[in-house]
Image (tube, rainbow, N blue to C red):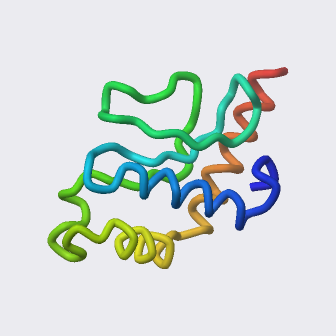
C-alpha cells in the first residue's frame, strides 16, 4: 500500500471509510485502478455503483446485515474482526494479477 504512504496509513483510511458507512449501507473497496495504474479505496452504495475499469482486491460489506447479528450496532468490532480474517495471500494474488493485466494493457 505504498500509494498511501504505508500499510498502516492505508488501513487507517480503509477503517475510517468502513466506519463512515456503519449504521447505513455500502461497501468499502480496495481496487486496482487501471486508469491511474495503482490501488484506490472508495465506497459503493450498492451493486450498481461500482467503479469502472478496475479490479477489486478487497471488499468489506458494511450493510448492517453483515454484522448486526454478531456485533449489534458495533461497526468497529465488526471491522476489527474483518481485519483479523483478511487472507492477505489472496489479496496479494489479486494484486499481482491486476498489475500483470495493467502492464499488458499498457503494452
Q: Is residue 97 above or below residue 58?
A: above
Identified at 26% across, 54% down, the residue is: 23
Say whether residue 22 is left or right of residue 43.
left
Identified at 50% across, 46% down, the residue is: 29
Q: Is residue 105 above or below residue 44?
A: above
Say whether residue 100 is left or right of residue 52.
right
Closer-to-camera residue (101/19): 19
Say whether residue 36 is left or right of residue 24.
right
Q: Quadrant of residue 47?
A: top left
Closer-to-camera residue (46/20): 20
* Place of residue 56 in the rendered image (x, y in percent of width and height, measured from the top left): 53, 42
Identified at 75% across, 22% down, the residue is: 105
Residue at far left of view:
69
Say whether residue 42 is left or right of residue 50.
right
Q: Is residue 31 above or below residue 37?
A: below
The quadrant the C terminus occupies is top right
* Place of residue 3 in the rendered image (x, y in percent of width and height, measured from the top left): 79, 47
* Place of residue 1 in the rendered image (x, y in percent of width and height, measured from the top left): 74, 55
Q: How many marks?
A: 0
Closer-to-camera residue (53/102): 53
Q: Quadrant of residue 54?
A: top right
* Place of residue 80 in the rendered image (x, y in percent of width and height, measured from the top left): 45, 75
Q: Quadrant of residue 98?
A: top right
Identified at 71% across, 67% down, the residue is: 8
Amino acid at each position: 500500500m505504498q500509494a498511501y504512504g504505508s500499510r498502516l496509513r492505508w488501513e487507517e483510511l480503509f477503517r475510517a471509510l468502513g466506519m463512515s458507512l456503519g449504521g447505513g449501507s455500502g461497501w468499502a473497496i480496495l481496487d486496482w485502478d487501471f486508469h491511474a495504474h495503482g490501488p484506490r479505496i472508495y465506497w459503493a452504495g450498492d451493486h450498481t455503483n461500482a467503479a469502472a475499469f478496475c479490479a477489486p482486491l478487497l471488499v468489506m460489506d458494511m450493510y448492517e446485515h453483515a454484522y448486526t447479528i454478531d456485533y449489534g450496532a458495533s461497526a468497529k468490532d465488526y471491522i476489527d474482526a474483518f481485519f483479523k480474517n483478511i487472507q492477505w495471500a489472496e489479496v496479494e494474488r489479486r494484486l499481482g494479477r491486476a498489475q500483470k493485466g495493467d502492464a499488458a494493457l499498457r503494452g
